[in-house]
């Protein structure tokens, strides 16, 4: 996700996402933007998968 996308950051963190990396992203030779990586703990992913499969 792009750094500065505050709505997405709030959503990911509210859903249990952990910010695990930040790095420059170069979508074009003359353009650099910040990219933020989020991951979720395995236990949370397993619980959500179980809940969603019952919907």
Image (tube, helix red, strand yellow):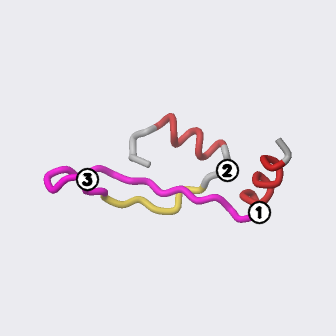
Tell which residue pokes out farthest to the bottom in this image.
Answer: 42
The chief SS type of the magenta part is strand
Quadrant of the image for the C terminus? Answer: top right
Q: Which residues are magenta?
A: 25-42
Identified at 61% across, 46% down, the residue is 13
Task: Report x, y in % for residue 7.
Answer: 51, 34
Classify 10 Å Cα crowding around label 1: few (below 14), some (14-19), many (20 and above). few
Query: Which mark is nearer the camera, 1 or 3?
Result: 3
Mark 2 highlights which residue?
Answer: 16
Q: Residue furthest top?
A: 7
The residue pinned by badge 1 equals 43
> Which quadrant of the structure image shows residue 12?
top right
Position above or below: 6 against 32: above
Q: Is residue 6 left or right of residue 45?
A: left
**Magenta residue check for 38:** yes
State the separation of the CA atoms marked 2 and 1: 11 Å
Which of the two labelled residues, at mark 2 and mark 3, occupies the earlier sequence position? 2
Instruction: Report the mark closest to the observer, 2 or 3.
Output: 3
Q: Are marks 1 and 3 in contact (CB under 8 Å)?
A: no
Report the front residue among 13 and 44: 44
Q: Earlier in the sequence, mark 1 or mark 3?
A: 3
Dot 3: few (<14), some (14–19), or many (≥20) neighbours within 10 Å? few
Up/down of 23 relative to 12, above or below: below
Query: Residue 34: image x %, image y %?
Result: 34, 52
Pointer 3 residue: 27
Point out the residue furthest to the left here: 30
């Amino acid at each position: 996700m792009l750094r500065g996308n505050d709505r997405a950051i709030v959503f990911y963190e509210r859903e249990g996402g952990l910010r695990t990396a930040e790095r420059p992203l170069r979508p074009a030779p003359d353009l650099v933007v910040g990219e933020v990586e989020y991951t979720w703990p395995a236990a949370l992913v397993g619980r959500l998968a179980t809940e969603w499969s019952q919907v």
